[in-house]
Image: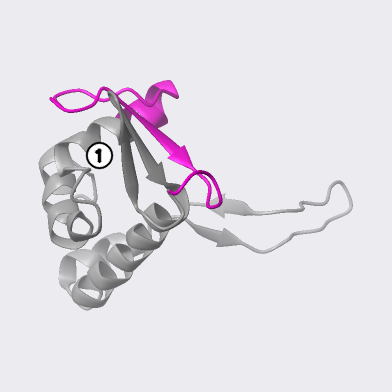
Amino acid sequence: MNEDGRATKSKYIEWYNEYIYKYFVMLPADTCYSLRCGVIHQSKGDVKNNQIYNRIEFCRPGNYDIFTNRTILHGDVLTVNLEQFCIAMEHGVIDWYEKERSGPIFRKNAARVMRPRHILQDTDRAFYGPMVIG
């Protein structure tokens, strides 16, 4: 975790290798970082710097035989079981949190972390559904 709470490519890759890669060996850290940037910034599943596949697609359980496998390679497209990927990410975050939560850097940055907001109602408007602050 960085002092200023900002993410960097090298920190993401370090975190991914420690907490996630063991669940998805077909999805190396630099490729997942490329996917993360593509999805967040451009809404694309294209990946860079991977010699085996050029695109990643997520599949819900029940499609193909991906339900029992975490990943399947179809030509130059890697299909990833979305549920398994989310579970691995959740476990990785929990493991990371348990390790870092009592450290000074985590405590310093915790106040700025996004968190759920409860439903608010006032005379002018009502907010419904998930809301995030931070």
Give the answer, above or below, for where 11 lies relative to 42.
below
User: Where residue 71 appears, x then y in whole percent?
Assistant: 33, 46
Identify residue for label 1: 32
User: Where residue 9 appears, x then y in whole percent?
Assistant: 16, 38
Question: Residue at point 17% right, 74% down?
Answer: 103
Tally of numbered discs: 1
User: How would you rate the neighbour count of disc 1 (Cα within 10 Å): few for under 14, some for 14-19, many for 20 or more?
Assistant: many
Horizontal side of 110 relative to 53 (left or right) equals: right
Horizontal side of 66 relative to 50 (left or right) equals: right
Question: Residue at point 38% right, 43% down?
Answer: 80
User: Where residue 72 appears, x then y in whole percent?
Assistant: 33, 41
Which one is nearer the viewer's eye here, 127 or 19? Answer: 19
User: Where residue 107 appears, x then y in whole percent?
Assistant: 26, 69
Give the answer, above or below, for where 60 lies relative to 100.
above
- Classify mark 1: helix, strand or loop: helix
Instruction: Examine the structure image and report whether residue 41 is included in the region drawn in magenta.
Output: yes
Specify start and end residues of the magenta stretch as a single range: 37-65
Tell me the quadrant of the picture where the N terminus can be found: bottom left
Residue 113 can be seen, yes or no: no
Dividing the picture into quadrants, the one containing residue 68 is bottom left
Horizontal side of 123 relative to 84 (left or right) equals: right
Which one is nearer the viewer's eye here, 65 or 57? Answer: 65
Which one is nearer the viewer's eye here, 110 or 122? Answer: 110
Type of amino acid at the residue the image marks with label 1? Cys
Instruction: Examine the structure image and report whether residue 132 is included in the region drawn in magenta.
Output: no
Give the answer, above or below, for where 117 lies relative to 45.
below
What is the magenta segment's predominant secondary structure? loop
